[in-house]
Amino acid sequence: MVTVSVRGESFLLDGKPTYIDVPSVNPRAIDMLLNTRMVQALFEDENPETQKLWCYPDGSEFDPERNTNEFIEVLPLYKAYGVIAFTVNI
């Protein structure tokens, strides 16, 4: 379990500033709580009128399983860039 705390305007994880151990992080990000909104990461359009609007660049029909799987596959890449939190809508 990780303990999250706040000291002044700094966010700490287990008592250490966030991102302090991420070698490639921009120093301005240290002690911040970086998050990215991935509202469409878990998504399925059940409306037959609008389903056709959601297709992939390769032209294939939108697939909610593919969408979720592709999101999960790139999580390590996001972490490598210092993103440690996501907001998704369900």
Image: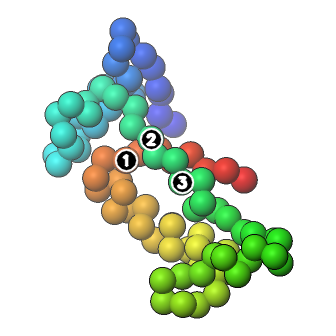
Residue at 17% x, 48% y: name it.
Answer: 24
Q: Which mark is residue 83?
A: 1
Above or below, 90 against 28 in this view is below
The amino acid type, in three-letter code, at marker 3 is Met
Q: Residue 76: where, in percent of width, then height? A: 37, 62
- Residue topped by disc 3: 38
Give the spatial CA distance, label 3 vs label 2: 9 Å
Residue at 58% x, 62% y: name it.
Answer: 41
Give the spatial CA distance, label 1 vs label 3: 12 Å
Above or below, 36 against 27 in this view is below
Question: In this orientation, does residue 65 appear?
Answer: no
Above or below, 31 against 72 in this view is above
Residue 34 appears left or right of 69: left
Label 1 with label 2: CB-CB less than 8 Å: yes
The amino acid type, in three-letter code, at marker 2 is Asn
The amino acid type, in three-letter code, at marker 1 is Val
User: Mark 2, residues whose alpha carbon is within 10 Å: few (<14), some, or many (≥20)?
Assistant: few
Mark toward the viewer: 1 or 3: 3
Please name the colour scheme applied to the rendered image.
rainbow
- Residue topped by disc 2: 35
Question: In this orientation, does residue 57 appear?
Answer: yes
Give the spatial CA distance, label 1 vs label 2: 6 Å
> Which residue is nearer to you in this view: 30 or 17?
30
Considering the numbered disc 1 on the image, is that residue within a helix, a strand or a loop? loop
In terms of sequence position, does the residue under pointer 1 or pointer 3 come before the other?
3
In which image quadrant can residue 15 be found? top left
Considering the numbered disc 2 on the image, is that residue within a helix, a strand or a loop? loop
Q: Residue 45: where, in percent of width, then height? A: 75, 69
User: Mark 1, residues whose alpha carbon is within 10 Å: few (<14), some, or many (≥20)?
Assistant: some
Q: Residue 1: where, in percent of width, then height? A: 51, 37
Residue at 37% x, 24% y: name it.
Answer: 12
